[in-house]
Image (tube, rainbow, N blue to C red):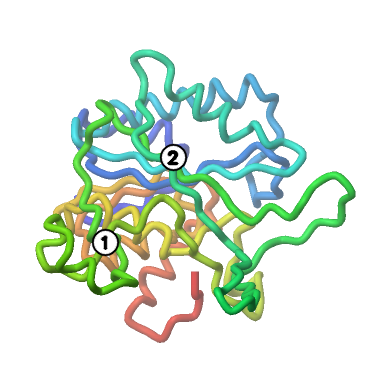
Amino acid sequence: MAFRLEHGDCLAGMREMANGSVDLVVTSPPYNLGIEYSSYDDTQGREEFLVWCCDWAREVQRLLGDNGSFFLNVGAAPSNPLFPHQVLLALTTPGFFLLQNTFHWIKSISVETRSGETISTGHFKPINSKRYVNDCHEYVFHLTKTGDAPLDRRAAGVPYADKSNVGRWKHTDGEDKRCRGNNWFIPYETIQSRDNERPHPATFPRALVTQCIRLHGKGENTRMLDPFLGIGTSAVAAREAGIEHFTGFEIDADYLTTAERRLAELETPDLFGL
């Protein structure tokens, strides 16, 4: 199969794929929040949109192996906070997916140190409102068929802050790495030009995809799918992780061209920083 970046509707494309032919799905579909995509109308009625989500997610369920993982990135708007949960509820009705983990993608955060210093880091889109605060995070829902898909927690882990824990806990096996948990601080990288470096209104950082790949824990043998490829961030992360089998679908020809160019330029200095 190798790397396949296909131009077309993901529903039609996935229907051509065999049952159980995918191990890992990492994707971020349109949010139906009025985002100005190049060629997709992001303003469907809510019920119509949820039906559509169930349609393509049923294909994902069919393609996913029994121990496969489906990482679904969904964001919200301050004025529409229930949207991610409505999508999740639609995809977890009886006989559909089970929610195994919920991750919080933290884009920006302020932390007060023990000395009383406040450190603010990351990037977010500020809003001017008397009702809402700035929205600095999105969800990544980990959906599986059975609720007990195995994960490699330490592959996506972090070193212990207190090194004495390495020897104190038997489950460490002497390795200085612990489970990262479900809060992932992954900021966008600074760019100079959105048109040239991030020509898509709703892309995610490649580090987010990399975390999902590591957590899935199957390495280069993973068969990975992204039904909503966009400008190819998931494909770039997969290639960098050594994954040999990847399929991505993108309905917008310009976005697909950017994705193809990003893959071709992996051996050159990084021009995108996504």
Which residue is identified by label 1? 178
Name the one closer to the observer, 65 or 99.
99
Q: Identify the residue at horizontal 42%, vertical 31% (top origin).
A: 11
Residue at the top extreme, as displayed: 94
Mark yes or no: residue 132 visible. yes
The x and y percentages for residue 33 are 69, 40
Q: Is residue 65 left or right of residue 258?
A: left
**Residue at the extreme right of the image, as rendered:** 130
Question: For numbered disc 1, what is the local secondary structure?
Answer: loop
Residue 209 figure quarter: bottom left
Q: Position of residue 8 (x, y in %)?
A: 46, 42
The structure residue drawn at horizontal position 31% and vertical position 67%, both measured from the top left corner, is 158
Q: Earlier in the sequence, mark 2 or mark 1?
A: 2
Vertically, is 194 above or below 53? below
> What residue lies at 65% left-to-right and 70% top-to-bottom?
195
Categorize mark 1 by other alpha carbons within 10 Å: few (<14), some (14-19), many (20+): some
Question: Which is closer to the viewer, label 2 or label 1?
Answer: 1
The label shown at residue 41 is: none
Comparing 175 with 218, the one in front is 175
Q: Which residue is mark 2?
A: 141
Of the residues shown, which amino acid type is indicated by label 1?
A: Arg
Secondary element at tag 2 = strand
